[in-house]
Image (cartoon, rainbow, N blue to C red):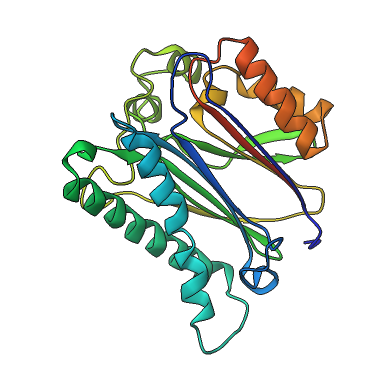
């Protein structure tokens, strides 16, 4: 993978909500905080939930918790580049620790009881993309002008699709499509953390987004906008503009990465 990747990110509160409960984190080596050449570059989106600004707090705690991955790796005396398998295991461990951190924070602050967040993490190593994911934010791979969803939605409706009770088209319009079966911080431990190891090719691009985008745009439209806008900054601008033009009923956050 070429080390000179291109990254852009955009967020908007939308037209309905007063607060932006989305949070994001980009660790791409630009600040020099971590050895990203060895340990990889990390991109994170979290979409919080909970009243009294608790959703904002949950998503922020979750994003900051992912920094633990670098602290764990830098404490490794071997100082070698982690294998994709090792990185995936450590990423899952960090996500589980982050869940416990959000849960404890809610238990210690009554106004935050029940708060939680989605969490979608892309860790780019030299030749692999490592995915860690909980909830219904999404990570896509854009390769050869085709869009591939790399994550699964931890929702009741997606479970119904998997069991054959709904089609994907019916799921996209279902009134219960936002009911989560898994979220960071809502329980003491996570049952399911989705992980994936995807080989990276030259000219690959990745898109991370909250459901404020995917509720407003079909995957086919996202694909078309990425075809028309190969520059990550242009792509983020057009995706955000169209999500808002289609209603902007939720917070919208997007991160585009081209390798």
Q: Where is residue 140 in the image (x, y as percent from the top left)?
A: 62, 39
Write down the quadrant of residue 4 in the picture: bottom right
Write down the quadrant of residue 241 in the picture: top right
Report the number of numbered marks.
0
Residue at 20% x, 39% y is: 113
Residue 154 in view: no
Left or right: where 147 falls relative to 73: right
Q: Between residue 54 and residue 224, name the one nearer to us.
A: 54
Q: Between residue 114 and residue 218, name the one nearer to us.
A: 114
Left or right: where 146 falls relative to 66: right
Instruction: Say above or below: 39 vs 138.
Output: below
Residue 230 in view: yes
Residue at 61% x, 83% y is: 80
Quadrant where the image shows the N terminus: bottom right
Q: Between residue 217 and residue 33, name the one nearer to us.
A: 33
Write down the quadrant of residue 100 in the picture: bottom left
Q: Where is residue 123 in the image (x, y as percent from the top left)?
A: 59, 57
Q: Between residue 203 and residue 144, name the one nearer to us.
A: 203
Instruction: Say above or below: 152 vs 105.
Output: above
Q: Position of residue 235 (x, y in %)?
A: 75, 31
Left or right: where 130 falls relative to 72: right
Q: Where is residue 108 in the image (x, y as percent from the top left)?
A: 18, 50
Instruction: Say above or below: 215 vs 229.
Output: above
Residue at 61% x, 15% y is: 244
Instruction: Say above or below: 178 vs 108.
Output: above
Residue at 68% x, 68% y is: 32
């Amino acid at each position: 993978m070429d080390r000179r990747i291109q990254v852009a990110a955009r967020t908007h509160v939308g037209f309905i909500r007063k607060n932006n409960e989305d949070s994001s984190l980009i660790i791409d080596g630009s600040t020099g905080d971590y050895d990203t050449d060895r340990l990889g570059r990390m991109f994170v989106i979290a979409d919080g939930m909970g009243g009294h600004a608790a959703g904002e707090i949950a998503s922020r705690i979750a994003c900051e918790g992912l920094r633990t991955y670098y602290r764990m790796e830098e404490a490794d005396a071997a100082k070698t580049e982690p294998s994709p398998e090792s990185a995936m295991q450590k990423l899952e461990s960090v996500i589980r620790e982050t869940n416990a951190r959000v849960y404890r924070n809610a238990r210690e602050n009554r106004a935050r009881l029940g708060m939680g967040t989605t969490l979608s993490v892309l860790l780019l190593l030299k030749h692999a993309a490592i995915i860690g994911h909980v909830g219904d934010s999404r990570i896509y791979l854009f390769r050869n002008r085709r869009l591939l969803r790399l994550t699964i939605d931890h929702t009741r409706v997606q479970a119904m699709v998997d069991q054959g009770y709904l089609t994907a088209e019916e799921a996209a319009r279902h009134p219960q499509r936002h009911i989560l079966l898994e979220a960071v911080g809502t329980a003491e431990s996570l049952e399911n953390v989705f992980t994936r190891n995807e080989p990276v090719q030259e000219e690959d691009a990745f898109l991370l987004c909250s459901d404020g985008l995917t509720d407003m745009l079909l995957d086919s439209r996202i694909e078309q906008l990425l075809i028309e806008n190969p520059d990550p900054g242009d792509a983020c601008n057009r995706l955000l503009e169209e999500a808002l033009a289609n209603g902007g009923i939720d917070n919208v956050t997007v991160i585009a990465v081209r390798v």
